[in-house]
Amino acid sequence: MSPPSGGTPMSGREQDRHGLSARPMTPDLDLATLRLLVSIAEHGSLNAAAAHLGIGQPAASARVRAFEARWRLTVLQRSARGSSFTRDGQAVVAWARTTLQSVDTMRAAVASLSEDRRAGISIAASLTNAEHVLPVWLGELHRRRPGLHPTLTVVNSATVVELVRQQGVDVGFVEVDGCPDDLGSTVIGTDEVAVVVAPTHPWARRTAPLEADEARAAAWVVREKGSGTRETIERAVGATLEAALES
């Protein structure tokens, strides 16, 4: 291939690297040249566009000339003051933008297919969620996204919140009445907390609602501190429960 006028000769390797090697023109559009033309429009000159794309000015000029020869168009009007787009060139640049946007969209979509096959999601869940609801949800997730590999950490609600806050997991599931303001959350279900007593306990046959004072005075078998269930009960009675046994 002859060197561009006023330029230096390029080796075959350099020509191949810039897509300028002497090979027959095909009817296919050269995406690299379309990017060059759009870059010229965005940066105001061929020199600036070439620098932005990391190619030499002679190679960029040759690429534009090859495009013009292939399509029998003049896209750049060259003068001593520089280059400007012809009317045809302006139309080509507009179409090139649309084409490249579609190509970039497809590239991202195809890449996401590959990423889905090796993607994972880390989940932290409180004990209640891990035992009663997550098995069904994870089964449905596997049905819909068989290539997604979840990992599950089972801890109390306070630890779930902290793991999410520190970005130690992607998502957390807790059973609490409201989440901290610095975290995004959504309610996905509701549950009911029931008080369970032995048949011989004074509360066993009562029909009246349990008063907060009675709850505060009682000794409880209750979850450990940090549990969402315990936090919900303590918020309801307005005091820290006296734990006879923590489970």
Image: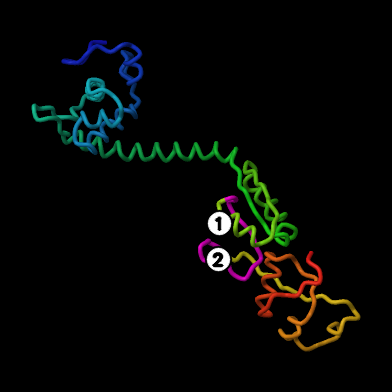
Q: Is residue 182 highlighted in magenta?
A: yes
- Residue 197 vs 145, above or below: the answer is below
- Residue 32 vs 115, above or below: the answer is above
Total count of labels: 2
Which residue lies at the image location 79% right of the left edge and 80% below the top edge? 218
Regarding mark 2 in the picture, which secondary structure is present there?
Answer: loop
Which residue lies at the image location 45% right of the left edge and 39% below the top edge? 108
Q: Which of the numbered marks, if any, corresponds to residue 165?
A: 1
Which residue lies at the image location 26% right of the left edge and 29% below the top edge? 51
Q: Position of residue 240 (x, y in %)?
A: 69, 75
The dominant secondary structure in magenta is loop
Q: Position of residue 77 (x, y in %)?
A: 14, 29
In three-dimensional space, the C-alpha distance between marks 2 and 1, rounded to whole angstroms, equals 10 Å
Locate residue 164: give its quadrant.
bottom right
Quarter of the N terminus within the rendering? top left
N-terminal-most mark, 2 or 1: 1
CB-based contact (under 8 Å), mark 2 and mark 1? yes
- Residue type beneath disc 1: Arg
- Residue type beneath disc 2: Pro
Q: Is residue 94 left or right of residue 216?
A: left
Residue wearing tag 2? 180
**Badge 1 local density, few (<14 within 10 Å), some, or many (20+)?**
some
Per the rendered image, the range of residues in magenta is: 168-185
- Residue 61 vs 237, above or below: the answer is above
Q: Position of residue 176 (x, y in %)?
A: 64, 68
